Amino acid sequence: MLFWACSTNKPEGYRVSQALRENTYPFLAMIMLKDRRMTVVGRLEGLIQPDDLINQLTFIMDANQTYLVSERLEREERNQTQVLRQQQDEAYLASLRADQEKERKKREEREQKRRKEEEVKQQQLAEERRRRNLQEEKERKLECLPPEPSPDDPDSVKIIFKLPNDSRVERRFHFSQSLTVIHDFLFSLKESPEKFQIEANFPRRVLPCIPSEERPNPPTLQEAGLSHTEVLFVQDLTDE
C-alpha cells in the first residue's frame, strides 16, 4: 500500500487533480489495480471524522478484497513465472557457455593439431631438402676427385679407411695431393657419416683435411707424413 499526497498548487498535484476531477477538498481517492489497470475504487471528499474515514476505507477495501486477492495471486504467479524464466535463462546461458567453452577447446585442439602437423611436415620437408642437398654435394665431390693413381706409380699412397660402421674402403692417392682430396673422397661415399674427422694411428693424430683460419691450405699427403701404405680411421662427428 502506498500513500501519496500533494497540493494542487504544485504542478504534479494539479495534473493529478485534473485527472481525478474532485469537487471539493480535502479529497482522498483510493486507487488499485483492477482488471489489470489502475482504477479509482473509492472517493472521499470534504471534511470527515476519523472514525468515519476508517470505516469507509475499510468498507472500500472489503468491497474490493476479491480483486486485491486476485491481483496478489496474479502478481505472485507472475513473479514465480519470472523467477522460473530467469532460472531457465541462467541455465540456458550456463549451458551455452559450457558449449562455447567446449567448442573453444576443440578449436584450440584442432589448431594445435594443425600446427603440429604443419611443423612435422616442415621438418620432413627440411630433412628432405637437407638429404637432397647432401646427396648433390656428395655427387659434386665425387665428380671433382682427381683420377686414382695406378699401383705402379712410385708417388702413390695406398690408404685403407676404417669407417665407423666397421667397413673398410681402399683407394690410392698421390703424395702431392692435398689432404682435402682424402676428405672429399670419404665424403662422397654413401656409407660415410655426414660429419667426420680422419685420424692416423702412428703417431696418433687428427689429419687437418679441412681448410681453417689457422690453416687455409691443408698440407699434402707427403707434408702430413703419410707413408706408401696407411690405415686411417674415420671418426663420426655427426652428433657433436
Image (cartoon, grey):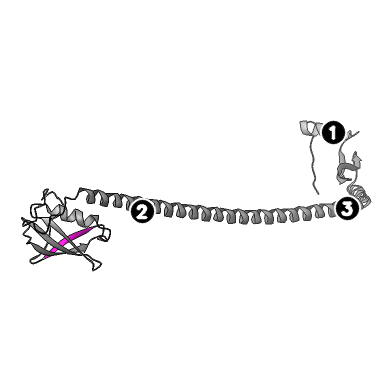
* Marks 2 and 3, the one that precedes in the sequence: 3
Whether residues under marks 2 and 1 lie with C-beta atoms below 8 angstroms apart, the answer is no
Q: Which percent across, then down, holds residue 111?
A: 50, 52
Identify which residue is drawn at 74% across, 55% down: 83
Mark 1 falls on what kind of element? helix
For residue 10, say whether it is visible: no
Most foreground residue, 114 or 51 = 114
Numbered mark located on residue 127 in the image: 2
The residue type indicated by label 3 comes to Ser
Whether residues under marks 1 and 3 lie with C-beta atoms below 8 angstroms apart, the answer is no
Q: Which percent across, then down, holds residue 46?
A: 90, 38
Identify which residue is drawn at 25% across, 67% down: 165
Mark nearer the viewer, 2 or 3? 2
The residue type indicated by label 2 comes to Glu
Most foreground residue, 83 or 102 = 102
Numbered mark located on residue 32 in the image: none
Q: Label 1: which residue?
A: 17
* Marks 2 and 1, the one that precedes in the sequence: 1
Between the C-alphas of marks 1 and 3, the distance is 29 Å
Mark nearer the viewer, 1 or 3? 3
* Marks 1 and 3, the one that precedes in the sequence: 1
Q: Is residue 41 left or right of residue 181?
A: right
Q: Which percent across, then down, holds residue 161?
A: 18, 63
Most foreground residue, 26 or 5 = 5
Local packing at callout 1 (Cα closer than 10 Å; few below 14, some 14-19, many 20+) is some
Q: Quadrant of residue 239?
A: bottom left
Mark 2 falls on what kind of element? helix
The stretch in magenta equals 190-200
Q: Is residue 17 left or right of residue 116?
A: right
**Residue 195 among those drawn in magenta:** yes
Q: Label 3: which residue?
A: 70
